[in-house]
């Protein structure tokens, strides 16, 4: 809550699954004076961030950085590679998959949504077999792209992207593979090249620890080739001018200079800790969060233990309790922000973000707030989740 008339004591605990807390180092970097985006200094910064971000995507190929939120990067991925009326296969894993589909429809693409009754699809990741089966039927190759979400932020479920690639290849189908990695990148294992992804979409305000405002497209050579024939209208999003100017570290329009200072710092922090160490830290935090849920006797929205997210966890409350009422109480009493239930799980779940700049003690503080809040709200708890999480992290 933004309180302009008073300043609450202590720190605000921002534990929504994005935007995530921005570390002081990054905030300081962003506060530097804006420089000439056509000057020599900027070119050096541009080359450094464009090269550095590739290591986070684990790609050798270009990454385009837009001054945009993740939604803009979704649009960019589609308009650069597809033509009006093209058929796109999408998969209902949760709220963000549903929104990407809606965006594709609005662009004049034809979407086919592998969907499920009720919240069934929201409790599991993508079943690659379903995709392979649909592609095998498509003998005319009408499907031009398969679009899936890697870390479904609305549900705390991760999909196996390498398995989706294998499914597409096993079906002998030429469709492009496009992946939304908006919330996972920088916090959950992701491999653009090794997993054979054609376009990866990402954003700045989640695993990358930056404020909102940067959108990313990582582009495979096959996607780049598709962009030469794609006929959906595009101007601002067109990759060609970006790629051309990026060669020397510049942007075709005015870039988000200060966010790029922040990105430079974020890359330095992630590579300084070691990307593998960062990913392992988030695995531990996710495990501790799940230990708390088990101890409380509550249910994780994610049903399959092999698909749990290291980025965010959605806690399913018993039917009688309104999760948004609980969140409100927790915010007012403890200055802790938790993620709301989105779409089909509105009011049923609250989400705990453990992405980006999060460590054992910040997570334990958040779990304490959840536990005290649930007690005050009357949610029956079996045992202390905080103690269970401590034991897990010890
Ligand atoms: C946050 C998010 C988006 C949307 O990004 P915006 O920055 O809000 O436009 C898309 N996909 C996923 C998985 C997200 O978590």
Image (tube, rainbow, N blue to C red):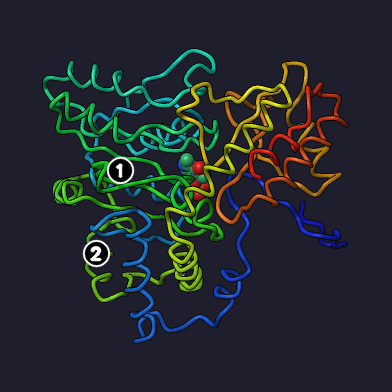
Q: Residue 283, relative to residue 251: is it above or below?
A: above
Q: Quadrant of residue 287?
A: top right
Task: Describe the element under mark 2 as helix, strand or loop.
Answer: helix
Front-most of residues 347 and 353: 353
Task: Describe the element under mark 1 as helix, strand or loop.
Answer: helix
Give left or right: position of 342 versus 131: right
Q: Which residue is disc 1 drawn over? A: 78
Q: Quadrant of residue 209?
A: bottom right
Q: Which residue is disc 2 drawn over? A: 243
How far across and how far down the image is residue 10, in percent? 82, 60
How far across and how far down the image is residue 159, in percent? 40, 32
Q: Nearer the viewer, mark 2 or mark 1?
A: 2
Q: Total number of numbered labels?
A: 2
How far across and how far down the image is residue 78, in percent? 30, 43
Q: Residue 258, relative to residue 194: is it above or below?
A: below
Front-most of residues 280 and 37: 280
Give left or right: position of 128 versus 273: left
Please tell me which residue is depicted at 46% across the width and 73% down the height of the picture.
Answer: 257
Q: Residue 177, relative to residue 56: is it above or below?
A: above
- In which quadrant of the rendered image does the C terminus lie? top right
Mark 2 and mark 1 residues within 8 Å of each other at the beta carbon:
no
């Amino acid at each position: 809550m933004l309180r302009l008339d008073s300043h609450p004591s202590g720190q605000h605990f921002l534990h929504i699954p994005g935007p995530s807390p921005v570390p002081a180092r990054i905030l300081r970097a962003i506060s530097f004076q804006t420089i000439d985006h056509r000057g020599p200094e900027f070119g050096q910064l541009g080359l450094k961030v464009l090269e550095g971000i590739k290591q986070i995507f684990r790609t050798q190929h270009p990454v385009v950085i837009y001054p945009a939120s993740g939604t803009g990067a979704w649009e960019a991925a589609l308009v650069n590679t597809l033509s009006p009326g093209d058929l796109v296969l999408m998969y209902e894993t949760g709220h963000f998959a549903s929104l990407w589909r809606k965006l594709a429809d609005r662009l004049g693409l034809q979407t086919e949504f592998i969907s499920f009754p009720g919240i069934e699809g929201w409790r599991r990741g993508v079943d690659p077999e379903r995709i392979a089966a649909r592609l095998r039927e498509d003998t005319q190759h009408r499907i031009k792209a398969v679009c899936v979400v890697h870390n479904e932020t609305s549900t705390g479920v991760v999909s196996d992207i390498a398995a989706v690639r294998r499914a597409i290849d096993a079906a002998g189908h030429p469709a492009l593979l496009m992946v939304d990695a908006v919330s996972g990148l920088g916090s959950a294992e992701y491999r653009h090249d090794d997993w054979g992804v054609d376009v990866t979409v990402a954003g700045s305000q989640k695993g990358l620890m930056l404020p909102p405002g940067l959108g990313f497209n990582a582009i495979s050579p096959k996607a780049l080739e598709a962009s030469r024939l794609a006929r959906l209208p595009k101007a601002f999003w067109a990759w060609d001018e970006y790629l051309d100017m990026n060669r020397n570290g510049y942007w075709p329009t005015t870039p988000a200079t200060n966010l790029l200072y922040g990105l430079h710092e974020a890359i330095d922090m992630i590579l300084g800790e070691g990307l593998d160490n960062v990913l392992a830290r988030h695995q531990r935090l996710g495990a501790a969060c799940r230990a708390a849920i088990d101890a409380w006797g509550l249910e994780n929205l994610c049903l399959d233990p092999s698909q749990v997210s290291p980025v965010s966890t959605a806690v399913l409350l018993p039917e009688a309790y309104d999760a948004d009422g609980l969140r409100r109480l927790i915010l007012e009493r403890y200055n802790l922000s938790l993620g709301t239930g989105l779409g089909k799980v509105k009011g049923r779940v609250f989400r705990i973000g453990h992405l980006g700049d999060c460590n054992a003690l910040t997570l334990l503080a958040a779990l304490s707030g959840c536990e005290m809040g649930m007690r005050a709200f009357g949610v029956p708890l079996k045992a202390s989740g905080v103690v269970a999480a401590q034991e897990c992290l010890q």
